[in-house]
Amino acid sequence: MSLLAIPIIAVIALALSVFCLVAIFILVTRHRALMSVYTSQLQAQELLINSIQATNDKLTAAINDVSIQYNNSLTESTLVSKQLEHRIKALQSQYNTQQEFISQLQNEKGDDKFYARAIKLARKGADIDEIVAECELPHAEVEMLISVYQKKTQ
């Protein structure tokens, strides 16, 4: 090997070292730039996660409030429904009682028709036998009706 070859090798080694240092410097610079971008993206993602978590907490609280209101409304509706059912049963009972009373009055009214007819006949001056035959009432009742209503007309 000649003496000239050593400095050339040294210069080539020095050039390769400088080239490697420059390449490493460029790679480190790019790496730092990428790290900066990734760091800012990470911070943005953390802010987004915090915002989503806060929104989730608000929505959970709102859902809990709505659930409580729903349960209260359901309880109130159940109570009102039971009160209405009780009131309906009471009104139905009153209605049935009144219907029975009306039926009784209508059944009794049939007898009243005979008495009303007998009174009309007595006012017109019909005799006892005529009223008994036409109204199917007892003889004593017809006598009483004639005595009461013929006196009123005289």
Image (spheres, grey):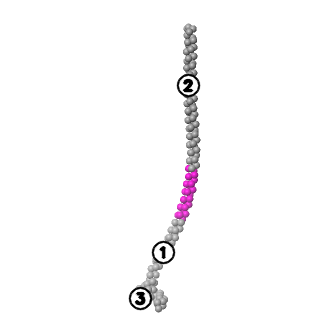
On residue 130, which mark appears? 3
Q: Secondary structure at mark 1?
A: helix
Image spot of residue 29 (x, y percent): 57, 27
Relative vertical location of residue 3 with respect to residue 59 in this rendering, above or below = above
On residue 26, which mark appears? 2
Relative vertical location of residue 9 with respect to residue 84 in this rendering, above or below = above
Q: Quadrant of residue 34?
A: top right
Tell which of 7 and 78 is nearer to you. 7
Q: Badge 1 is on which residue?
A: 102
Q: Nearer the viewer, mark 1 or mark 2?
A: 2
At label 2, which amino acid type do we have? Ile
Image spot of residue 24 (x, y percent): 56, 23
Q: Secondary structure at mark 2?
A: helix
Left or right of 58, for residue 119: left
User: Which tag, 1 or 2, sits closer to the chain's start?
Assistant: 2
At label 1, which amino acid type do we have? Ile
Residue beneath the point at 56% across and 9% down:
4
Tell which of 11 and 121 is nearer to you. 11
Marks 2 & 3, CB-CB < 8 Å contact: no
Q: Nearer the viewer, mark 2 or mark 3?
A: 2
Question: Is 70 included in the stretch rendered in magenta?
Answer: yes
Marks 1 & 2, CB-CB < 8 Å contact: no
Please tell me whether the stretch drawn in magenta is mainly helix, strand or loop.
helix
User: Which tag, 2 or 3, sits closer to the chain's start?
Assistant: 2
Q: Residues within 10 Å of mark 3 (few under 14, many from 20)?
A: some
**For the magenta stretch, what is the residue range?**
63-86
